[in-house]
Amino acid sequence: MININDIKSAHQRIKPFINETPVLTSALLNQWLGHEIYFKAECLQKIGAFKARGGCNAVQVLKEKHDTVKRVVANSSGNHAQAVAWAAAQFGVPATIYMPSFASKVKAQATRSYGAEVVLLDKRQEVDSAVELAAQEEGVFWISPFNDYSVIAGQGTVAFEAIQQVKQPMDAIFAPCGGGGLISGSLVAARYLQPEAKVIAVEPKAADDAMQSFLTGEIQRLKDAPKTLADGAMTLSIGGKTFEHIKHLDDFFAVEETPMVYWTQWLQHLLKVHVEPTCAMTMDGVCQWLRKQDQPKRVMVVLSGGNIDTEMMQKLWQKDHLTQQPSIELFSQ
């Protein structure tokens, strides 16, 4: 596992290049739910997602450790692709990004706009194989979306920053989980700064490999790319490095697609920021946890990103969910 010194070093390393994103609240939402919810708005980060932190840290660590970095390569369905492309451009390193052909068009185009070569392949398995092959060339380094200690440390700066911004003890810290880099870094930061706070992950029920890994104690792998609106959590499996952190989480929740859409609409409406379904779904996990509590709680939620293309936007707004007021009992079974 990484430690807090890794996160502190990452924070110092990336601070000149990233945004210190705000922590937002909604008095109306707090009133409706009966709890205090704080939102770390990484949707306002460089490239529109927290992934900029891990990418920026990883590229700098590579340059510190190796005399020659000829190229960096990455595999991603979106935000990590943009992060590595952006970070590589900051430090003058060529980048090639392998993406599935079903990835968000706006994320693929943004990745190209940062100067990276984008290679689209039909299946997620082909993407993973291609990046592994490319990384065998001398001077070429693979920056994993999550299974990389430098990436995990970079992602840990989100919670490290957020907890210090609020300056009040949190009862729980929630983050979405795809490959597990964000929740792994969040765990380490929280255990150091607020060891009493619960650290809890949330992922789509249609892609619950990480939750099943947490429950069974062994890494579980999906056979095919899952069908979910949470395109930032479509990884086939978590990695060995993130799993060592995920084992120590306090809880894990899975979310259906409808609550994901519901909370995307409501968070955009209440907070006036653009959020992806991948992070909006976390609020349903928060409500699942709050239903078990007998006293008001203070909760931090990481809004991991805000990159949505037109096609996804149309899917998200096919039905108006703003007519139904939020409550922690909503979607309870």
Image (cartoon, helix red, strand yellow):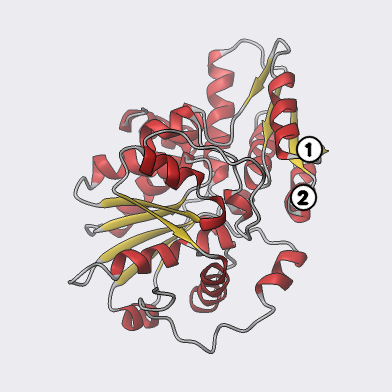
Of circles 2 and 1, the one toward us is: 2
Q: Say whether residue 235 is visible.
A: yes
User: Which residue is depicted at the point 64% across and 24% down?
Assistant: 142
Amino acid on which disc 1 is placed: Gly
Instruction: Quickly name the residue at label 2.
Output: 102
77 up-or-down from 333: above or below:
above
Horizontal side of residue 42 vs 85, given as left or right: left
- Give coordinates of residue 270: x percent, y percent: 49, 78
User: Which residue is depicted at the point 56% across and 82% down?
Assistant: 321
User: Which residue is depicted at the point 67% across and 17% down?
Assistant: 69
- Give coordinates of residue 316: x percent, y percent: 66, 72
- SS at circle 1: loop
- SS at circle 2: loop
Horizontal side of residue 133 vs 244, given as left or right: right
229 up-or-down from 215: above or below:
below
- Give coordinates of residue 254: x percent, y percent: 45, 57
Q: Which mark is residue 99?
A: none
- Give coordinates of residue 116: x percent, y percent: 77, 36
The N terminus sits in image quarter: top left
Rounded to the nearest angstrom, the CA distance separating label 2 from label 1 is 21 Å
Q: Which mark is residue 115?
A: 1
